Image: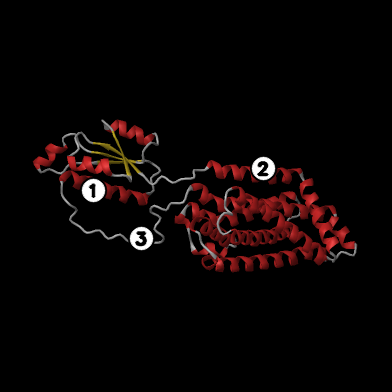
Amino acid sequence: MTTMMLTALIAKDFKGYFANRFFALVTVLSLVAFTGLYFLLPKTVDETLALGLVLAEAPPALEAELSSADEVRIARFATSEELQAAILAGDLPVGFVFPDDLAAQLQAGTQPQVTLFLAPDVPPEFVSIYQVALQEFVFLILGQELPIEVTETVLGPDMAGAQIAPRQRMLPLLVVFILMVECLGLASLIASEVEGGTIRALLVTPLTMRGLFLAKGIFGSLFAFAQAALLLLVTGGLTAQPLLNLLALLAGAAMVTGVAFLIASVGRDLMSVMGWGILAMLLLALPTLSLLIPGLTSNWMRLIPSYYLVDTLFRTLNFAAGWREVGANLLVLLAYAAVLMTIGTLTLQRRFR
């Protein structure tokens, strides 16, 4: 197979891809929409804890503590009803209501009843944190130190003071979606050529089946890579470790091209290609959920090929990881890409034998 034939086939696939107005429009819109979504997401993280407080008269120690606390934002309310309204409106996640006769109850030696109000969307694991904060308030009011010694143990990376902005968390997910859009487009192109008899007509010529799918593999990988690389370029993802990120994108593009071959081998028309493609997109997007919802992280996600692309990009973009930290990810990703390309090509070739 000559270079001229290979170039001609890639050019034909490029024209054929954009001849489908649906995927041509989706390709452009997805790139614009995902890029716009990245810039619309917050670029900073607010680590300030917002609390509501109903307290008739705060002791001097508590007033000094509240005025000097940079990590906690206290909103004072006159009544419990005002505090509850603010919480229901979404202005605050939690609030403490102390009785009006707090000082009298303390002098009498009775135990004051303090009410803790929580917003409906507060995670259950946060409730204990707010309860501890309530105890701190009570001890500050009493003027006594806590009679226990607290030892903190952080399980996993301590993200205090190093939270990741929402746009940076979403960026690997957007890259995976861009790659999958091109995967669906390539699978649709192959399915339409199979249905229209274009591929069989090409095989009548001196072109070999190996050369045909080599051209399609190169076209699919480079086209998907170009889209993802453009997204990273516009969003500033190539400012750090550009070669490492580009290599990860290229391996990811080859991986989804292999997936496109598999989809095209089982899809008989555009609708079946879309059905299998959406299923593949959901599966490959699962590892990105571990970035958005860390509690969903599980070891079985490492079996999904896109995990190694997502983990590599997340660590290089947000933690300045280098070749030593993510080199193993790249090797696994390249292995997955080679396996999927091989299986996809062999499976697709069986339709023409």
Question: Alpha-carbon distance for marks 2 and 3?
Answer: 42 Å
Residue depicted at 31% across the width and 34% down the height: 83
Q: Earlier in the sequence, mark 2 or mark 1?
A: 2
Rendered image: mark on residue 154: 3
Closer to the N terminus: mark 3 or mark 1?
Answer: 1
Is residue 272 shown to the viewer in this render?
Answer: no
Looking at the picture, which amino acid does disc 1 mark?
Glu
Label 3 SS = loop
- The earlier-in-sequence mark between 2 and 3 is 2
The quarter of the displayed image where residue 260 is located: bottom right
| Quadrant of the frame with the N terminus | bottom right
Left or right of 51, for residue 197: right
- Point 39% across, 52% down: residue: 161
In front of the other: 34 or 341: 34
- Distance from label 2 to label 1 (Cα)? 52 Å
Question: Is residue 223 placed above or below 73 in the rendered structure?
Answer: below
Mark 2 burial class by Cα count in 10 Å: few <14, some 14-19, many 20+ = few
Q: Is residue 109 visible?
A: yes
Task: Out of 235 and 112, give the one closest to the viewer.
Answer: 235
Does residue 343 sit above or below 317 in this rendering? below
Mark 3 neighbour class, 10 Å CA radius: few under 14, some 14 to 19, many 20 or more:
few
Say which element carries label 1. Answer: helix
Q: Residue furthest front?
A: 239
Residue on which disc 1 sits: 136
Q: Can you tell which quarter of the image residue 346 is in? A: bottom right
Which residue is tagged 2? 29
**CA distance for labels 3 and 1:** 21 Å
Residue 24: where, in percent of width, then height?
73, 45
| Front in this rendered view, residue 169 or 188 | 169
SS type, badge 2:
helix
The disc at residue 251 is none
Asked if residue 195 lies left or right of residue 302, the reply is right
